[in-house]
Amino acid sequence: MSYRRIINYRKNTIKANMRNNRPPGLVAIVIYKTFVAIILAIAATAILLALQNYQSFTSLSEAYILEGKLSIIEWLIEKVTNIKQQTLQFSGIATGTYAAVTAIEAVGLWYEKAWARILVLVLVGISIPPEIFELIKGITILKLVVFIANAAVFWYLLRHFPKHGR
């Protein structure tokens, strides 16, 4: 009887160790998705704060306090005040939702859930054609890096999907 307990204990320990040894590619994807979720959450917060302070931005842009001051601040305020409030609201909510979905993807991938792989494959697969279109319109370093990262994520999950799924 005690011999059986030892064997069962060993089997359970081996299974637990196998679960904790995540593939490096999967860990890299989780880190990437977490980073993207944080950036999106910051962007959503900034957009919604701009919406909340829309009148202040409008007043500030009409004042001549900024004349000759930091041109990037002038440019940013001009861009924000030229966007309709409804567009800002939609953009903030959509960005926040996408940040939440990306965070959920990261958590699901960390726990190696099959639904998370499917979700990532679908969302990344949908985003690749528009990214290619944007690259055709004009290549920038950021567009290229995002495209390469998303293509690598898609390829890795597609190639390794049956091996890690639970």
Image: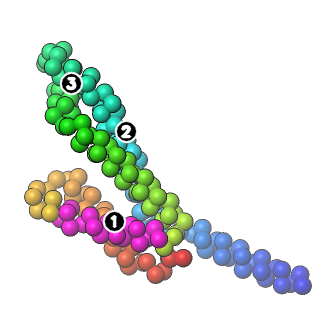
| Whether residue 145 is situated above or below residue 6 in the rendered picture | above
Q: Are marks 1 and 2 in contact (CB under 8 Å)?
A: no
In this view of the protein, which residue sits in the foreground, 43 or 90? 90
Residue where numbered disc 2 is placed: 45
Q: Tell me the amino acid under the disc marked 2.
A: Thr
Depth-wise, is mark 1 or mark 3 nearer the camera? Answer: 3
SS of the residue under disc 1: helix
Residue drawn 19% across the image and 31% down it: 81
99 within the magenta span: no
In the picture, measured across the screen, residue 7 lies left or right of residue 32, that is right
Q: Tell me the amino acid under the disc marked 1.
A: Leu
In this view of the protein, which residue sits in the foreground, 23 or 1? 1
Residue where numbered disc 1 is placed: 123
Instruction: Give the magenta-colored segment's residue range.
Output: 115-132
Q: Earlier in the sequence, mark 3 or mark 2?
A: 2
SS of the residue under disc 3: helix
In this view of the protein, which residue sits in the foreground, 150 or 141? 150
Residue where numbered disc 3 is placed: 58
Name which quarter of the figure residue 71 lies in.
Answer: top left
Name which quarter of the figure residue 148 lies in.
Answer: bottom left
Q: Tell me the amino acid under the disc marked 3.
A: Thr
